[in-house]
């Protein structure tokens, strides 16, 4: 059985009443991404499929990944990504790297071409340059410039920089999380997961979220594969994706496993988050505790998608 599931982020604030909705467009895009990734599964591996799915979304400024990523406090794009092969337990990740359109591919290069798991900042950027994977690309989209301007107005109106996580009054104007991710099961029974993001608007330069942390935003082994989206600090401190896979290993359905960990995240951190999961039997779980998780899945039987819990 072949399965690929993708997500386009979880809302971490309520949609604005009367605002123009792009929900249908986003779901349609995700369904197309899932189908294109499924075709990769026919000739390739789960790892190939999740990389391809994420690459497609990194090129689309609809999503907060690659081109069109959120801007940090000083107006720059710094991206995070990770990828994990559940059949080998190998993983690669990059964090706070500038000028790289496809950080998921750079993360795979870290996994396959170095003895490391995570490269960050200028080291990751120079590695990309050496491999011809970018390092000097302009990833700023005009829509993110206006979003940062709006966020700054909100921050100057009373936002707080205290605490170990972003202040809730600032998170309230970030809108859709838009982080992207994919999980897949191929015809050989191999599982893989990948996640990519530009992070939070107005984040401090150098901030790394869960999308670059194996076990937090991305995890895969022989039991299941999981990708997460939301306020990354919450998934990091709770080891979110790893705990979801562990719960599947205890016999829970992927959806119930995700819900169990989301309950913990909400109780312990009060933050919004969501997961997509597929297990070795091809069972799919999509769950969120925010204001709607954008998702789509594709199998040999067809493609479906929607907004879990919010539309």
Image (cartoon, rainbow, N blue to C red):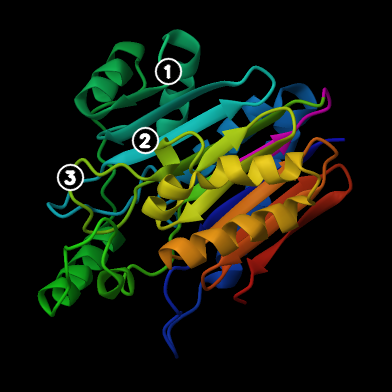
Label 3 CA crowd tier, 10 Å (few <14, some 14–19, many 20+): some
Q: In this view, does 77 lie above or below 173?
A: above
Q: Distance between the residues labelled 1 and 2?
A: 16 Å
Q: In this view, does 118 lie above or below 159?
A: above
Answer left or right for 88 relative to 132. right
| Residue at x-position 36% and y-position 45% | 209
Q: Where is residue 276 in the image (x, y as percent from the top left)?
A: 64, 51
**Quarter holding residue 164:** bottom left
Label 1 CA crowd tier, 10 Å (few <14, some 14–19, many 20+): many
Range shown magenta: 182-188
The C terminus lies in quadrant: bottom right
Q: Where is residue 108 in the image (x, y as percent from the top left)?
A: 49, 22
Q: Residue under circle 1?
A: 110
Q: Residue under circle 2?
A: 101
| Residue at x-position 54% and y-position 49% | 228
Q: Where is residue 12 in the image (x, y as percent from the top left)?
A: 43, 68
Question: Considering the numbered disc 2 on the image, is that residue within a helix, a strand or a loop?
Answer: loop
Q: Is residue 109 visible?
A: yes
Q: How far apart are marks 1 and 3 (CA)?
A: 22 Å
Q: Is residue 51 above or below residue 62?
A: above
Answer left or right for 31 relative to 1. left
Question: Considering the numbered disc 1 on the image, is that residue within a helix, a strand or a loop?
Answer: helix
| Residue at x-position 21% and y-position 58% | 202
Q: Residue under circle 3?
A: 205
């Amino acid at each position: 059985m072949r399965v690929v599931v993708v997500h386009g982020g979880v809302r971490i604030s309520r949609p604005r009443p009367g605002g123009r909705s792009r929900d249908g467009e986003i779901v349609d895009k995700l369904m197309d991404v899932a189908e294109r990734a499924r075709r990769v599964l026919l000739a390739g591996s789960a790892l190939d499929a999740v990389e391809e799915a994420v690459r497609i979304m990194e090129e689309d400024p609809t999503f907060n990944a690659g081109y069109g990523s959120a801007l940090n406090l000083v107006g720059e794009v710094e991206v995070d990504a990770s990828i994990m092969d559940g059949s080998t337990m190998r993983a690669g990740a990059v964090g706070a790297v500038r000028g790289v359109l496809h950080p998921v591919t750079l993360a795979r290069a870290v996994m396959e071409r170095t003895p490391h798991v995570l490269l960050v900042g200028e080291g990751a950027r120079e590695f990309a340059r050496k491999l011809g994977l970018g390092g000097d690309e302009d990833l700023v989209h005009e829509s993110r410039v206006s979003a940062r301007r709006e966020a700054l107005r909100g921050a100057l109106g009373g936002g707080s920089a205290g605490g170990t996580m972003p202040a809730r009054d600032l998170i309230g104007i970030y809108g859709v999380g838009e982080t992207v991710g994919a999980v897949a099961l191929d015809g050989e029974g191999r599982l893989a997961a990948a996640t990519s993001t530009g992070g939070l608007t107005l984040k401090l330069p150098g901030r790394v979220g869960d999308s670059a942390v194996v076990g937090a935003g991305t995890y895969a082994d022989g039991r299941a594969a999981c990708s997460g989206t939301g306020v990354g600090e919450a998934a990091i401190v709770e080891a979110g994706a790893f705990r979801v896979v562990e719960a599947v290993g205890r016999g829970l359905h992927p959806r119930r496993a995700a819900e169990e960990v989301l309950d913990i995240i909400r109780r312990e951190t009060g933050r919004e988050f969501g997961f997509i999961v597929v297990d070795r039997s091809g069972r799919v779980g999509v769950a969120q505790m925010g204001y709607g998780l954008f998702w789509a899945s594709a199998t040999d039987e067809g493609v479906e998608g929607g907004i879990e819990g919010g539309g």
